[in-house]
Amino acid sequence: MRNTLNNLWYDYKSEFFFGLVLLVLLFASTFLSRLIPEDFFDNFLNPALSLAFAVLCFFGAALCLRHLENNRIRKVWAIILLLWGFWELVMVALFKTAYNPFRVSNELMESTPMLLACVFAWLLFIYPSISMRPGKFNWGRGALFLLPVVVLGVINYVLSVDLRLLIALYPIWLMYVGFRKVHRYRQWCEENFSTFDNIDAQWIVRYIMMIMLAALVFYYLCVSDDPARAFTQQWYLMFVLGYTTDQVLHRPDPWERLRSTAVEEEKDEPDPANAAYRATLDAWIEKEKPYLNPDFQLSDLRQVLPINRTYLSRFINSAYGCSFYQWVNDLRIEEAKRLMREQPEHKVQDVAERCGFSSRRVFYQIFTRETGQTPSEWLSAKSNPLLR
């Protein structure tokens, strides 16, 4: 039981605690918003939050542009922050007028602010789109995802049809598209990298989780009769944009890592069943053990097989019946088993580091998934003949 709890802890503690903290803060914010006097919120807090939001956006955009370094993801994120910042300044300018589309009232949200919220949902959707396919993204293609909002807006105002229910479904559709993109992106990562820790695969999942919570806040804003309900939305979106800006600035770009290691590639596709290629690769793997390097990636195989990276991926899938990620981690697990049998006094952390795993948590996760046991359970079974 204890080992099972330890495994659960190391498998999920990062995402679990991140999501838990967000939920606690959201509930605390919702509770506190009910204590805010309506006049104080309308006349002071709401415009102050919008102004702080604008300052945060402009500051984040300046950081991204200052450290652009030919990074297209930072450039697009800076544009998103600038657009959002200018809108918040408009909100500050309009908060005393009757034209403020987000003026808080004790009624259900009207179509105009819902449509504007969908535009911001679209802006948040752009970041994972370009992160997962930076070479394929362009603003024209991205604008196609905004087309449903335009159509709903035209029908709503020209034909005077109440489409608030359909408008509310738009963020759900965006999240569905995002999760489909994540699935394909994870497959691409598994074909090129041996660990997800230093690339964007896990971060994209966390980002979409934040957007899901933002959608819940949006729906709360739509149906709540609490005049201070916008307080929860404002501070939470500030957190999302600030946290994402930090990640954009500091997380390595996996596409850039591949480009930096690229060399001249063959034009002809090799035979995936080429026995000589496999023999050469197996001999190199056994002698050099490159998988013990946590940063080992598919392009490193070109030291012994100088062929196109796409063909390399196909070769690994054909020769070993799995992705590059799975193949490398199988090698690491076998090395960990050997090390634990020969030197059982080693701590799990030491075994994880010596076998190429980026952390103890990742080692626990992969070892348990592959063997059905935690490392300590597996070692106990190997040490006790009755359990074999």
Image: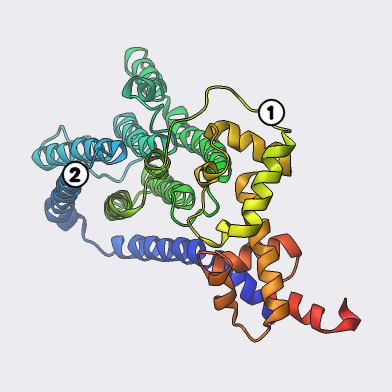
User: Residue 347, relative to residue 271: is it above or below?
Assistant: below
User: Mark 1 — residue?
Assistant: 271
- Name the image quarter holding residue 370: bottom right
For disc 1, the neighbor class at 10 Å (few under 14, some 14 to 19, many from 20) is few
In the displayed structure, 358 sits above or below 146; it is below
| Along the line of sight, the residue nearer the viewer: 370 or 4 | 370
Residue 273 relative to residue 158: left or right:
right
Front residue of 174/66: it is: 66
Circle 2 residue: 61
Q: Earlier in the sequence, mark 1 or mark 2?
A: 2
Q: Residue furthest right?
A: 386
Residue 307 visible to an observer of this rendering: yes
Which part of the image, by quadrant, shows the N terminus? bottom right
**Residue 343 appears at what percent x and percent y?**
67, 82
Image check: 23 left or right of 57? Answer: right
Q: Secondary structure at mark 2?
A: helix
Which x, y percent locates residue 166? 47, 28
Residue 320 is marked as: none
Residue at 74% over, 70% down? 373
The percent coordinates of residue 298 (x first, y second) are: 54, 44
Provide the secondary structure element on which disc 1 rests. loop
Distance from the alpha carbon under mark 1 to that under mark 2? 48 Å
Residue in view at x 24 percent, y 45 percent: 104
Q: Is residue 374 left or right of residue 226?
A: right
Q: Is residue 94 above or below residue 377?
A: above
The answer to whether one can see residue 360 in this image is no
Which residue is the extreme one toward the top?
A: 159
Amino acid on which disc 1 is placed = Asp
Percent x, y for residue 315? 66, 36
